[in-house]
Image (cartoon, rainbow, N blue to C red):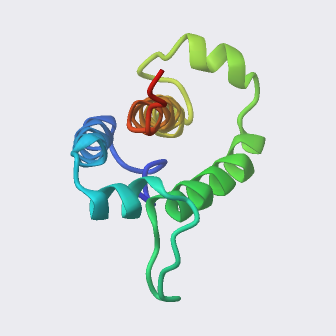
Amino acid sequence: LGRLLEQPYELNLQLTAVLSRLSAFSHPLLHEYLLNPYIHLSQSSRSLFSVLIRVMGELMQRIQQVSNLSERLHVLTPQLDHLTLLKGVIVLEEFCKELAAIAFVKLPQDQD
């Protein structure tokens, strides 16, 4: 996942699909590890949240090199410069939305 901005689109889709399925799975340890941004881990371990933060930081640096970013995201053509990066941006955005939806659905519901 840390290489989302360099990997092929198809690989990113497969990877995020697996992580989404694992996140949606009803298991307390998976939920804790994948959806809790405040989980305490050893220094050599990384959580999904910490990896996403690092990827977004890298993205913020790399998009500075892309002129007309909004236009390029709307019209992805095969000969477009930075195509892998732009596809990575789209996958990252959709994956974050999916994780947010999964976390929301898994919130404990108040009984009325």
Q: Residue at x 55, y 64 (%)?
A: 50
Between residue 112 and residue 86, name the one nearer to us.
112
Quarter of the N terminus within the rendering: bottom left
Residue farthest along the front direction in this orientation: 112
Q: Position of residue 39 (x, y in %)?
A: 51, 70
Q: Position of residue 89 (x, y in %)?
A: 54, 35
Q: Residue at x 56, y 32 (%)?
A: 81
Is 14 situated left or right of 34 in this image? left
Between residue 100 and residue 91, name the one nearer to us.
100
Answer above or below: position of 71 versus 6: above
Between residue 11 and residue 79, name the one nearer to us.
11
Q: Residue at x 53, y 88 (%)?
A: 43
Q: Quadrant of residue 17?
A: top left
Q: Position of residue 104 (x, y in %)?
A: 47, 33
Count of numbered badges drawn on the protein: 0
Q: Quadrant of residue 20?
A: top left
Answer above or below: position of 91 versus 12: above
Is 86 situated left or right of 11 in this image? right
Q: Residue at x 29, y 59 (%)?
A: 28
Q: Position of residue 66 (x, y in %)?
A: 71, 35
